[in-house]
Image (cartoon, rainbow, N blue to C red):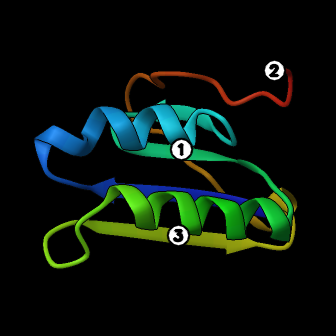
């Protein structure tokens, strides 16, 4: 599946969330990650993020589609980082 994860967390947790998500997805913009992952990886992401965030304060949005081909992405302005499948 192709996933986009967007987060808005307290400043003291931003670095931890960012470092954690870099294990699974491509960083594309401040607080935004995307890439191809498996269901198992998505479960691991949810568990890992759940241990980092404060659910009473922070917000994580997970968008997913079966394939990137179903996603129409349009960039206005400068693209901060091009997404590739090469790690």
The circle on residue 85 is none
Residue holding disc 2:
87
* Front-most of residues 72 and 45: 45
| Number of numbered discs visible in the structure rendering | 3
Contact between marks 1 and 3 (CB within 8 A): the answer is no
Describe the element under mark 1 as helix, strand or loop.
strand
Q: Is residue 83 left or right of residue 8?
A: right
**Cα distance between the residues tagged 1 and 3:** 10 Å
User: Mark 2 or mark 3, which has the lower sequence index?
Assistant: 3
Residue holding disc 1:
33
Q: Is residue 82 left or right of residue 36?
A: left
Mark 3: give few (<14), some (14-19) or many (20+) Cα within 10 Å. Answer: few
Q: Is residue 86 left or right of residue 22?
A: right
Q: Is residue 52 left or right of residue 28?
A: left
The circle on residue 62 is 3
User: Mark 1 or mark 3, which has the lower sequence index?
Assistant: 1
58 vs 33: above or below: below
**Cα distance between the residues tagged 1 and 2:** 14 Å
Quarter of the picture holding the N terminus: bottom right
Q: Kindly indicate the quadrant of the structure image that contains residue 69.
A: bottom right
The image position of residue 30, as x and y in percent, is 33, 35
50 vs 30: above or below: below
Q: Is residue 1 visible?
A: no
Describe the element under mark 2 as helix, strand or loop.
loop
User: Mark 1 or mark 2, which has the lower sequence index?
Assistant: 1
**Which residue is at a point 75% across and 72% down the rendered structure image?**
65
Mark 1: give few (<14), some (14-19) or many (20+) Cα within 10 Å. Answer: many
Describe the element under mark 3 as helix, strand or loop.
strand
């Amino acid at each position: 599946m192709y996933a986009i994860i967007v987060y808005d967390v307290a400043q003291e947790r931003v670095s931890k969330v960012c470092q954690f998500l870099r294990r699974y997805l491509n960083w594309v913009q401040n607080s935004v990650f995307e890439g191809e992952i498996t269901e198992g990886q998505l479960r691991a992401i949810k568990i890992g993020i759940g241990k980092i965030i404060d659910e009473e304060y922070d917000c994580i949005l997970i968008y997913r589609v079966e394939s990137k081909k179903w996603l129409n992405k349009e960039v206005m302005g400068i693209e901060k980082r091009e997404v590739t499948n090469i790690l």
